[in-house]
Every structure is written in C-alpha cells, then in structure tokens.
Image (tube, helix red, strand yellow):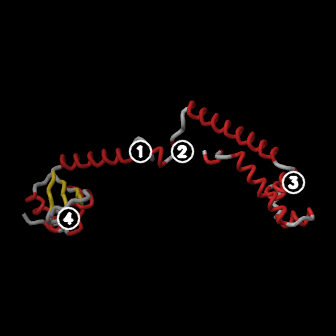
Amino acid sequence: MKNTYTATQQKELFAKDCKLINLKYEYTGYIGQEKWAIVSELSEQELFEKYPDEVKKYIPFVLLSVEQGKAIQAYNRNEDKYRKRQNNNSDAFGYDDGTTENMHSEVSVPDFIEQQEMDDYYNRRAEEKMRLFVTAMASLTEKQHKYLVMRYVDGISARDIAKAEGVAHQVVDRHILAAKKKVEKIFGDFFRK
C-alpha cells in the first residue's frame, strides 16, 4: 500500500499516532545506540509503511507500546513530584552527629541547664575581674593611679603627662611601669584561664 500523504500531513499524523522520547535527554548517562524511543500502538512494520519519511529521521529507535509509554510518564511524574517535595521540604543541614554543630553553630542551641551553667560561669568571672581590678587600683600609690588613668583611660602620652605635671617623662614612665607590674601581679593568671 503506497502512502499518499504529503510531508506535512505525514508529520501531523505521526505526531497524533506516536510520541517521541529522546533517550539521551531523558536518561542521563544513557550510552545505547538508539537515540529515540517511539511510543505507538502500531508495529514497526506498520510505522514504516504509514510514515516512512518521519520514521527514517529517528533510526535507530526503540519501539514501545502505549502501556510502556504510560509507565514511563507515570515514573517521570512520580520522580518530578518527589524532587519537588525534596526541594520544598528538605533541611539545608545534614543530621550527622557533630558535623552540623561544628559547621553551623546557629542550629545547635544549648539546653537550659547548660545555658544556665555558662551564664553563671561568665557572671562569676565578671565579678572576680571587678574584684581584682578594685584591689589592683587600691594597691597603687596616688601618682601611679593618676598616671595610669591619664595614660590608658584618657589616652595621653607619657611625654604630655610629664609636661602637664612638670616632671621628666622618665619619671612618669617609671610610675606607669610600676603600676602595670602591680596590676599584672594582682591579676596573675586570670586572663589565661
């Protein structure tokens, strides 16, 4: 039986009767020789008789039944559904023990007791620092106290303090050095803990 359809008509009828699947696009990593799958109720012989020009474009191909085509469509829909669900509902963080906490500290919140213990520790440490500071400042002579405050609180250089006090800058340096030694001795290893 000779086919009397024009090329355009053949193309339209082929599109109605058959569905094409590009195997290399559809299945990543596919390495078979057949590039196309044709899903149709027609046999291979009937395809070549009815649409010879269209079928030649897709040789070599795999012929699949309509049921097989529907199964592939259902599989692809299901995979797409799960991919979308994964994208919408998955966590950005893994659940490996220790890894998440180390890489993303914002997700690991200490429990109430642990937080309370840390707060208590920092409060005791702040109180101890203040007590040591008061003790250290009380142990200084009047000049050591005055020069230390002028140098480190007010930010005045030793030479400017010496000019203002009318003494040599070496005298101011000696008082500041002695004051620093007393403070360091009283604080001891506090900042190394």
The crowding category of the residue bearing disc 1, from other C-alpha atoms within 10 Å (few below 14, some 14 to 19, many at least 20), is few
First in residue order: circle 1 vs circle 2: 1
Where is residue 9 shown, x and y percent of the image?
Answer: 22, 65
Q: Return the residue at label 3.
A: 143
Q: Is residue 174 left or right of residue 31?
A: right
- Tag 1 and tag 2, C-beta contact below 8 Å: no
Q: Amino acid at mark 3?
A: Lys
Give the quadrant of the C terminus.
Answer: top right
First in residue order: circle 1 vs circle 4: 4
The residue at 84%/51% (across/down) is 145
The crowding category of the residue bearing disc 2, from other C-alpha atoms within 10 Å (few below 14, some 14 to 19, many at least 20), is few
- Tag 3 and tag 4, C-beta contact below 8 Å: no
Q: Which secondary structure, mark 2?
A: helix
- The residue nearer to you, when weighing 14 against 44, is 44
Q: Which secondary structure, mark 4?
A: helix
Q: What is the spatial separation of the Cα atoms under label 1 and label 4, in whole angstroms?
A: 54 Å
First in residue order: circle 3 vs circle 1: 1
Q: Return the residue at label 4.
A: 10
Q: Is residue 99 left or right of residue 139?
A: left
The crowding category of the residue bearing disc 3, from other C-alpha atoms within 10 Å (few below 14, some 14 to 19, many at least 20), is few
Q: Return the residue at label 1.
A: 94
